[in-house]
Structure formats: C-alpha cells, structure tokens
Image: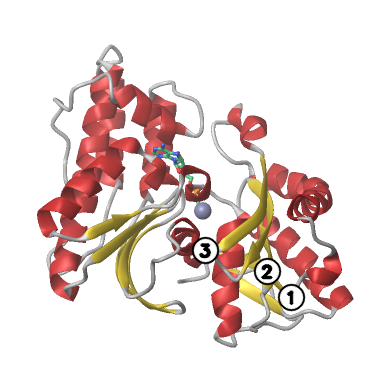
Amino acid sequence: MKKDIITLGIESSCDETSVAVVRNGREVLSNVINSQIEIHKRFGGVVPEIASRNHVEAISSVTKEALEQAGIEFSDIDVIACTYGPGLVGALLVGVAYAKALSYALNKPLVGVNHIQGHIAANYITHKELKPPFLCTIISGGHTHLVHIKDYTDFEILGKTRDDAIGEAFDKVARVIGLQYPGGPKIDKLGKEGQPNIELPHTYFEDSLDFSFSGIKTAILNLHHKNPDVNKADLCASFQKTATDMLITNTKKAIRKLDVNKIALAGGVSASDYIRKRFEELGKEENVEIYYPELKLCTDNAAMIASAGYYNYLAGNTADLSLNAIPNLKI
Ligand code: KG4
Ligand code: ZN
C-alpha cells in the first residue's frame, strides 16, 4: 500500500502566520491561522515591520498547535513546505528560516512554494475531484491573474494586472469612504444595500487579457472628494459591479480562447458573495463548471501552501538550505 505523505505547510507572506498539516495534498488535519488583522487595522493596512515581528513571536506556538490539532509529532512529517514569495520580504523570511531549520533538524525534504500557486491549490482541498487542466482567476490583495493551469506544476499566465491588484483597489476604496481594513468584506456587505447606479470607467486592453484597476479606484476617490455625501452603499455596489465586469469579460475571453470547461476562483477576494454569484452566472452562460475554495481557504492560510507543496514535492521540485525569500516572485 502506498504510504501517506504528511506535509507541514508554513505561510507568513503578509499578515497571517499560519501552519497546517495536510495528508496527501488534499486532506487537512489542521490549519492554524494567527491573523494580525486587529493589529494592523488602526494603520489602515499592513505595516511590514510590525508584521515581521509578529510572525517571529507567533510561529513556534502556531506550529505546536498545528501538530497538536493534527495529532502528530514532528517525526511524522514527511515534507516541509513554506511560502518563499511573493510577499513582504521580512515576513517571508520568518517562515523560510523556520522551515529551513525544521528541514535541517528533522532531515526532511524542503519545498519552496509560490504563494499564488498556493491560492490555486486551495481549490484542491475543497474540491477533491478537481484536476488540471482548468482556468483560474486569481483575485487577492496583492495579485490579479488569469492563469491556465495545465498541470499541478505547469502554469501559463494569460493576463495580469498592470497596476493595482483588485483586493488593493477594494481596500483603498474602503479606506477612503471610511470602512476599516480589510475593506473587501465590508464593500461586499454594504454593496448589497445599494444600487450599481454610478457610472465608472471600465479598462480593457486590445489583444490582451491584462487588467487595470487604478482607473476605477481613482474615479471613486475623485467622486468621493467632490461629493462626500454620495451614497456609500451605491458607491460600493457600483465599484463591485464595474470591477467584476472587468474580471468576467476577460475570463470569458480566456474560456473561448482555451476551450476549457472548468474555472476556479482563488484568493481572498474570491470570498465575495457578489463575485461568486457573477461567476456562477458566467458558468451557466458559457456552460462551464465554477469552483471556489471554502471561505476559510480563500484568504491566506497554510493548508493551501501544504497542498501546493505536496504537488511540487511529487514533481521533484524540492529546495535546499539556500532557499531564500523572493518578494517579487513570479508564478
Ligand atoms: O488572499 P489574501 O488573503 O491576501 C493576498 O494574498 O493578497 O487577500 C486579501 C484580500 C484583501 O484585499 C481583502 O479585502 C479581500 O481579500 N477580501 C475580500 C473579501 N474577503 C477578503 N474582498 C471582497 N469580498 C470579501 N468577502
Ligand atoms: Zn494571499
């Protein structure tokens, strides 16, 4: 009988210190997430230096808890996977250094995981039957990518943002209209009470599936400065609708270009009810199956890193102790 592979995943690229234990890339035995959201809230966004220090303080106890919840010991771990980019360099370094120390001490293989690949892999945990190839629309605080997932470790980028990530635009718009960080969930909630009746600019590029969210963000900021009494719920609804229109248009073009029958959403912004609904509609219209991770796996967590790490391990993509943090790592 084939032996189970137990992967310890470590995530520290932004403001979540997370450690998870995952069996065979799909079965979560534990997924402990220590979020720093409360700490960064009063600054209106993540402060890198504060994030790094909090990762250092949290990582040992989060690891201990992940092992306890999974009911395993250090000696039961087969593979150690950590996020090594993209992200905040000081924050990434904490997870990378910790993973390297564990790999050395336990004499177990080390795998460096691209954070964006981690977001994609969150879908493998929620949907046990999902296998490549499929199209993935990755929408998070730091990234907006349209990717053809040809195989577990074989990706082709079809389009990406040329300026702000969609989540960044959500967070900035929210801050300007007085909603607290992270703004995405608040815009999603308030938008339900409003009407998308404010005309905002859509940005598309000819012969390209790239995105741009800076135009819509600036339009909202100008609108709000000119008229601070503008209805906030309508503003949220209009912003969400316009940003989602852009996502849907390019995703639809990609479906037709590739002739795929599966689309997965990934990343923190895929927690949005509104965006999920719009993609469900797109699925019906284009006759494609829509997948998205369960809510807890949409935002940053280590289970998704363990899953991506497992598939990289199977593909032979292991690292040695020279593994370093790469803040601008590409997919
Ligand atoms: O994936 P993630 O945790 O971090 C990055 O890798 O960037 O994404 C965080 C982003 C934030 O911009 C947050 O506002 C957004 O995800 N977000 C949402 C929702 N929940 C989180 N955006 C819209 N609707 C939500 N329900
Ligand atoms: Zn993320």
> Which element is circle 3 on?
helix
Mark 1 — residue?
78
| Residue 304 in view here | yes
Mark 2 and mark 1 in contact? Answer it, CB < 8 Å. yes
Earlier-in-chain disc, 2 versus 1: 2
Front of the two marks 3 and 1: 1
Front of the two marks 2 and 3: 2
Between 327 and 14, the one lying in front of the other is: 14
Quadrant, the N terminus = bottom right
Among the 4 quarters of the image, the one containing residue 93: bottom right
Earlier-in-chain disc, 3 versus 1: 1
CA separation, marks 2 and 1? 6 Å
Among the 4 quarters of the image, the one containing residue 204: bottom left
CA separation, marks 2 and 3? 13 Å
Between 44 and 104, the one lying in front of the other is: 104
Q: Which amino acid does label 2 sit on?
A: Thr
| Residue at (65, 76) in percent of width and height | 111
Q: What residue type is labelled 1?
A: Asp
| Residue at (76, 68) in percent of width and height | 99
Mark 2 — residue?
7
Mark 3 — residue?
118
| Relative image position of residue 159 (x, y in whole percent) | 28, 66
| Residue at (65, 60) in percent of width and height | 89
Q: Quadrant of ligand 1?
A: top left
Q: Does the residue labelled 3 lie within 8 Å of ligand 2?
A: yes
Q: Which amino acid does label 3 sit on?
A: Gly
